Image (cartoon, rainbow, N blue to C red):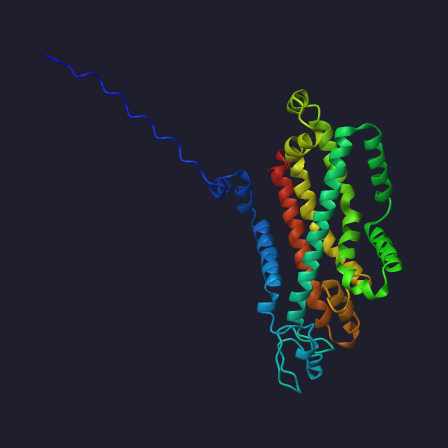
Amino acid sequence: MRTEPPTSAPAAAPPVPRGALARLLDGDLFHSFIRSPITVLSALVVLAILVAALLAPVIAPQNPFDPATLNLMDGFTRPMQANEFTGNVYWLGTDAQGRDLFSAILYGSRVSILVGFAAVAFAAVLGITLGLVAGYRGGWVDSLIMRVADVQLSFPAILVALLIFGVFKGVVPPALHDKAAIYVLILAIGLSDWVQYARTVRSSTLAERNKEYVQAARVIGVPAPTILLRHILPNVMGPVLVIATIGLALAIILESTLSFLGVGVPPTQPSLGTLIRVGQDYLFSGEWWIVLFPGLTLLLLALSVNLLGDWLRDALNPRLRR
């Protein structure tokens, strides 16, 4: 009797590579995010404010900074009540110039968010660069950078920003003050916040520079900038992301504080801080909505970003995971 030779089992098909989105949805970070209702709510609030600010020219009923669209007869209209002269109704009321507060908040949020993101990006780039150089080189370079950081930490951030604004107004001609105000504001906030990034990155770089993969890169002749950018930097970005998230809220608050004090953005491009400063002049005369709604918007934005930063700190630190 003739027997057939045993047939081999078919080879298993190679695994299909998964996309970045699928890996993200299956990761611990995403599961930690969806398990925290407060974090999800905070993310939705931040996303709603960001989308509304970006789409302000489409969503806003009027351009509050275009005098041709304003009517002084609409001034001091209460929220959701018809104006006694024009009959117009505004969701959040109007200010003394007849500007729709809802539109003003949307346009003002654009300025605050733009300055906050740009200032955080500038501070992060400056602080990360100085921290990497200080931690990797050591010696007198490390001492010099850290002593400068220690001196700056002895001054509040708002005083550093005010000093930079004072120097700017003394050097730049008055005709250019309004045009360059936003750039100077970004520079002032960024220069007042770089220290946290530098100190954090330096401490992480000190721990990473003596590890085997860095020593191996040195032995084979990899240049120092390549080692810093391709090997050390990715391993120190976790704490930096947490600092940047929390620093975004602080930058927005600092911008609003400076604008409230009258040294921020010009009145032609008001931010949330400028709207609050204008509204507080009428707070005790009964027009409470002019300061209330910009203040609530700033509170929601800063609080939501801070809550996201707290969650990100816990999610990226295994010792703090619950």
Left or right: residue 195 compared with residue 29: right
Say which quadrant the N terminus sits in: top left
Q: Residue at x 84, y 32 (%)?
A: 143
The answer to whether any part of residue 213 appears in the image is yes
Say which quadrant the C terminus sits in: top right
Q: Quadrant of residue 130?
A: top right
Left or right: residue 173 compared with residue 18: right
Between 194 and 170, the residue placed more toward the observer is 170
Between 104 and 317, the residue placed more toward the observer is 104
The x, y position of residue 198, in whole percent, is: 76, 39
| Residue farthest along the bottom direction in this orientation | 85
Above or below for 162 versus 316? below
Q: Residue at x 34, y 28 (%)?
A: 12
The x, y position of residue 87, in whole percent, is: 62, 85
Q: Residue at x 63, y 48 (%)?
A: 308
| Residue farthest along the left direction in this orientation | 1
The x, y position of residue 117, in whole percent, is: 68, 52
The x, y position of residue 93, in whole percent, is: 66, 75
Q: Residue at x 67, y 77 (%)?
A: 78
